[in-house]
Amino acid sequence: MTLKQSLTPTLEQFNLDSSVYEKFNSEKQELQEIKEKDDEQIGKIENNWFIWLFLFFLYIGTLIICFYFTYLLFWVKPIKNDWLLVLIAYSSLAIFILPTYINEKLHIVKLIRNIFTFGKYKKLIAEKEKIEQQIKFLEETTKNKVKDFEDALYSYYKNQVDSFYSNRLYKKRSGTKEFEDSLEEFNSMIQTISDVNKILLTKSFYLGEYKNYLEKRKLDHNIQSHTIENKDFVHINNFVKKILQSNEKKEVVPPEIKFRNPVKIDWEQISKNNIEIGLRGEEITISNEKNYLTDIGREDLANEICHVSVEQGDGLGYDILSFFPDGRKKFIEVKTTRKSIDTSFYISRNELNFLKENQDNYFICRLSIDDERKTAQFEMNSASDLLNNKEFVPTEYVVKNKQ
């Protein structure tokens, strides 16, 4: 089935719906979980020290028998069938030394494992191979179903991205409001296409060049995450969110289990470092906000930006009071780290409540500072992005007297 390049490809046009991906991911996940359990049991058997000890003594015993028959053959008066005995002995040794060159079913190591587990090892291997075949069949059949849709989707959105970059950004004068808006819109498009790559089974968009382009401009321009969405990407963005949300595994490892290892911690030094890097991140964010508003001709708003965490103290639910170009207030909470920008971070109950109450104008600015390279990565996340795409895991409890 072919579509005109101007039409947005949809699953319905190919007699499909989102369940084709949801069912594929669900069934594959179930098969993968069974395979992982089989792998775990197979690993326990293959790493069983008792079986390895038995195999070691069996190998040594076979080696001694080989040497003994060789000794009889060459240094003691030969007896009848000596050559046959030596051949049998060395053939047994070859099963240990050269398993690659003989039939796997004759491999003595697998035979011994199967004997010690009363046939369980052989069943697990057979079940694992069966699961792998089922996964392969599931992938092939699903790919055949969605291939035409993904071909059309890939062609359409690749053309959209390339055309937008060529017409709206490439060799265009930066610093203008039009360029800033185009940059934010393009950033939103690339993030959506990155998520599309997680779903597609037969295609993959190459975005390295565009991601490098955006990375170079993240600190020069105040790029907001998903603040401007391209109208042609509304459908695919909704489709991506639905599929990715259906793929999420709801099981969460409690922090008390994940971080139960005993360790000595210098809380005073950690607190000092956190305060220092946190203040630096807030100062960088304020500088970016002021530069952005000044560049678009709103120097009056730039002068009104307030560093509330310093001037008024913590507890308001945000660190910086900035402004949108139209004068509306923008509340910014800054989370700075020396690790990857994708590292998990903490948010207080007060900050979370304020985020939910001010979803239209609340942002969390994520900063990663590399002191050695003297660089910083910058990412601005809106409240709606955080609530839709992030998971909030409770980590503390308040203990009080019962009423």
Image (spheres, helix red, strand yellow):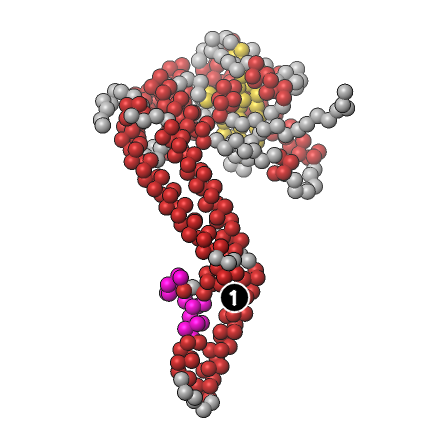
Residue at left offset 54%, top offset 66%: 54
Q: Quick one: 334 or 376, which is closer to the camera?
A: 334
Judge whether 205 appears above or below 116 on screen.
above
Residue at left offset 54%, top offset 33%: 251
Query: Which quadrant is the N terminus positioned in?
Result: top left
Name the residue at the front extreme: 118
Residue at left offset 56%, top offset 31%: 344
Looking at the rendering, the stretch of residues picked out in magenta corresponds to: 90-105
Residue 4 visible in this rendered orientation of the protein: yes
**Residue pointed to by mark 1:** 55
On the image, the x and y values in percent for residue 275 come to 64, 28
Name the residue at the bottom extreme: 77
Residue 211 visible in this rendered orientation of the protein: no
Residue at left offset 44%, top offset 72%: 92
On the image, the x and y values in percent for residue 253 come to 58, 35
On the image, the x and y values in percent for residue 400 come to 75, 24
Q: Amino acid at mark 1?
A: Leu
Quarter where residue 256 is shown: top right
Quarter where residue 263 is shown: top right
Q: Main secondary structure of the magenta part?
A: helix
